[in-house]
Image (cartoon, helix red, strand yellow):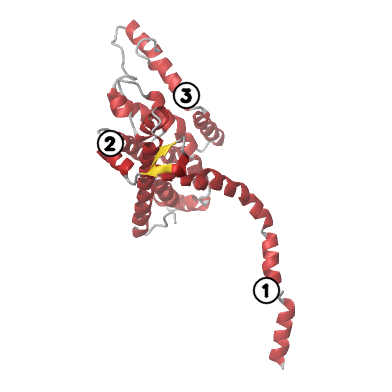
Amino acid sequence: MESTGLTTQVANVLPPAKTTKLSSWQRGIPLYFMILPGFLFFSIFKYIPMAGVLLAFKDYDPFIGLWGSKWVGLEHFQRLFTSADFLTLMWNTLALSAVNLFFFFPAPIILAILLNEIRLAWFRKSIQTIVYIPHFLSWVIVISVTFILFATQEGGVNKLLVDWGFPRFELLTSPDYFRPLYLSQNIWKETGWNAVIFFAALASIDPTLYEASVVDGASRMRQLWHITLPALKQIIIILFILRVGYVMNTGFEHILLMQNPLNLGVADVFDTYVYREGILQGQFSFTTAVGLFKSVIGLALIVVANWVAKKLGEEGVY
């Protein structure tokens, strides 16, 4: 009898299953409205355009449309892999990506750690604000300033060099300087902005850890090695995996503005090749195949990098 009574009381307290599900759905309505803009954005601009990859397998004719165009299978991919430009494009793209991955990627981490060591709050915040600003400048402005300073004939730096009796500095026309210039512009423009996420991670570290380490006699380097870097490790791994997925994307606008006939041998990458062949020459199907090839390589690299991270005992991105 006691058991039956208790069961009855519990049944009276708990709402019916359908009512619980309905109230749970109603409580989530504000969240659903918050998700809706992101859902619509990705649906309209990311997932629906994926149907366009069919162009890579067709000989697209704009006058008869996508569905009326003839299927050609892997013909465009075969043309890409046998093209005389393929190895040059691949080498140039991988070289710029390697420069970005090994020199640009660590820059925000180093900046965040250095600024974290500054104890004067107003000075640290001032530096943070100053390094954010270049991110809001367009590449057109950045390249224009570079030309004003380093143009071979009319650049301010070269005029000074000539006035002082030195030879002109061929920074913008020499292929040897293209990659260092590309890297230095990337670091100057984006390091501060990319450091924001590391600033947030550093701010979440419990200050008592540093206080306890001081009591134990730990130096600043010991604190960095045993407290700061372990706190940043997971976010560094996640961002590195995501960065690996962009190996085939080196920045179209930046490189196109820096290109000229003298440095084209090292400055021509898949992004600018797609623009030149697809938009200027009207080879939409062929350049769609190039874009699909880039996407497949990026996806494969993310999967491999995530697998390696998990094998090493880290979380990964999925």
The residue at which mark 1 appears reads as 17
Of helix, strand and loop, which one carries label 1?
helix
Q: Amino acid at mark 2?
A: Phe
Percent of width and height locating residue 228: 44, 48
**Which label sits on residue 140?**
3
Q: Amino acid at mark 1?
A: Ala
In this orientation, does residue 246 appear? no
Tell me whether the residue at label 1 lies in contact with that at label 2, contact meaning CB atoms closer than 8 angstroms.
Answer: no
Mark 1 → mark 2, Cα distance in angstroms: 61 Å
- Left or right: where does residue 274 sit relative to residue 79? right
**Which label sits on residue 307?**
none
Q: Nearer the viewer, mark 1 or mark 2?
A: 2
Tell me whether the residue at label 2 lies in contact with that at label 3, contact meaning CB atoms closer than 8 angstroms.
Answer: no
- Left or right: where does residue 19 sit relative to residue 296? right
Tell me whether the residue at label 3 lies in contact with that at label 1, contact meaning CB atoms closer than 8 angstroms.
Answer: no
Mark 3 → mark 1, Cα distance in angstroms: 60 Å
Closer to us: 48 or 9 = 48
The residue at which mark 2 appears reads as 86
Mark 2 → mark 3, Cα distance in angstroms: 28 Å
